[in-house]
Structures are given as C-alpha cells and as structure tokens.
Image (cartoon, rainbow, N blue to C red):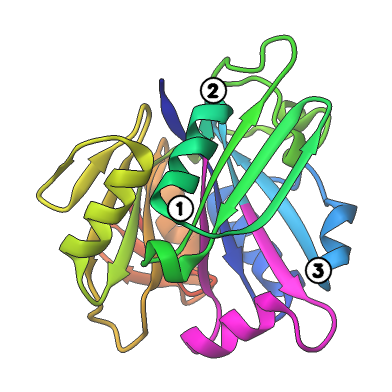
Amino acid sequence: MWLRLRQIALVAETLAPVERELIDVLGVAVCYRDPGVAHFGLENALFPIGNQLLEVVAPVQANTAGGRYLERRGGNGGYMVITQCDDHAPRRARVEALGVRIVNQFETHEFRNMQLHPKDTGGSFFEIDEQYGPGAHAPDGPWEPAGPDWQREKHTERVSGIAAAELQCDDPAAVAARWSEIAELPVVDNTINLDNATLRFVPCNDGRPEGLGGIDVVATDPAAVLNAADAHGARFGEQQIQLCGLRINLM
C-alpha cells in the first residue's frame, strides 16, 4: 500500500488577499472553488502545484471549525495534511483499531474521504482519501476535491511540487510515532517518508501552538518567487518565504 501527499490546506481569515499573494508569488492559478465547503461555513480556492494541490479555506460565517482553528493558532496558517492512498478500506480499519476518531467523512461514486481528529493524532489534521475511476492512482490523475479538470490550471514555471510538510508539536517524537502508527510507515529521526514527500515533526518554536507550520516546495524559478515575495513583504530568509502564515522553504 502506498500513501502520497496530495493536498495541503491552509486557513485564512479572508480568502481574497491570500489568493492574490499565492498567485503573485508562486505563479499558480485557481483551478476550482468547491461549493461543498459552504456546508461548513467556508469558502475556498484550490491551486495546483505540480501534481499536488494547495487549498485555502476561509470562514464566511461565525462559529465555524475553521474560525475556531484560526483563533486557537493565532491567525492564518497551515490547516490540513491530506494524503491519497491506493486502498481505503484497510486504512479505515487501521484507524478504527487505533481508536482514532473521524471528524469528517464522505463517500461519492469515485471518492472516499477520512479526516482524523487532531486531538487523536496530534500536530495537525491528518486526512486519508482515495480516488476511484479511470487513471485514479496516476500521480496527475483525477482528484475530486479539486474539480473535474484541475490539470488545466497547472503552471510549473515557478514551483512544481510539494516535497515536505513540517508539523510543529509539543512532543515531536510522540506525534511522529502516532502518525507512523496510522500511516503504517516507519519513523526515523521524527521523519516519515511518504511515496512522494516527507513529513517532519519538529518542536513548537515560533510562539504558536501545534499545527502545520511549513512546507518545502520544489522551485523551478526560485529567483522569480523570491523577487515576488520581496514585493509583498513575504520573504523570511535566504530561501524561505511566508504566505498565509505558513513558512515555505524553496528547494
């Protein structure tokens, strides 16, 4: 069984300015706005980064889970690590055997979703999904949450993939071990290697509580990204920028 990093979700107080920054700095484009998130009091936008997706959600009404998460973490930031598997049933059985609660799930004709409770995983929201249908398991195959033709808006002139997610934790070793149990993958030095990316578990060191603190992005034109980040006041290091409260390391 394999497990891929397929999507990273961010949460923002307001969608439009974050959307503009992502487009201007990373050179990406919106591929889809999911009307289904309105059920949760949210609006969203999805952006392809190579064969993976970056999503931003923002609350449009009071007392939403996204809004409470913004309050808990003190503003915009990382929200969810969303993975794709090739066999959902045993993944579901594993989660149930470990006593991990599922906070959201849905099934359609071609998609299975399983979002795990962060209090039972630690670190961040951890989601395991499977796509069905023709070409479903291809790296650039269909992905229902990103709409019917997300590939048409794939632009790789500046960035071409998400290579890692960094989760800051009160106890990195314990959270890494928990995610390792769930993913059924080994953990070495607080790191788990997925099929196409790495999950790193690090201490909380930026004054914010546990959460998705950063990602590594493969940059095809790092100079263009950094120049655009400078224009937005979003450069935070030699090869690091910050967008939507998320550290982005250029690889």
Comes first in the chain, label 2 or label 3: 3
Q: Amino acid at mark 1?
A: Val
Residue 61, by quadrant, is bottom right
- Residue found at x 47% / y 67%: 118
Q: Is residue 145 left or right of residue 22?
A: right
Q: Is residue 62 found inside the magenta-colored segment of the image? A: yes
- Residue found at x 44% / y 56%: 99
Q: Magenta segment range?
A: 55-83
* Nearer to the camera, 171 or 102: 102
Label 3: which residue? 40
Q: Amino acid at mark 2?
A: Asp
Task: Using the numbered discs, state the Cα–Cα distance from disc 3 to disc 1 in whole angstroms.
Answer: 33 Å
Comes first in the chain, label 2 or label 1: 2
Residue 129 lies, in percent from the top left, at 60, 37
- Disc 2 element: loop
* Nearer to the camera, 52 or 128: 128
Asked whether the residues under the numbered discs 3 and 1 touch, taking CB atoms below 8 Å apart as contact, a structural biologist would say no
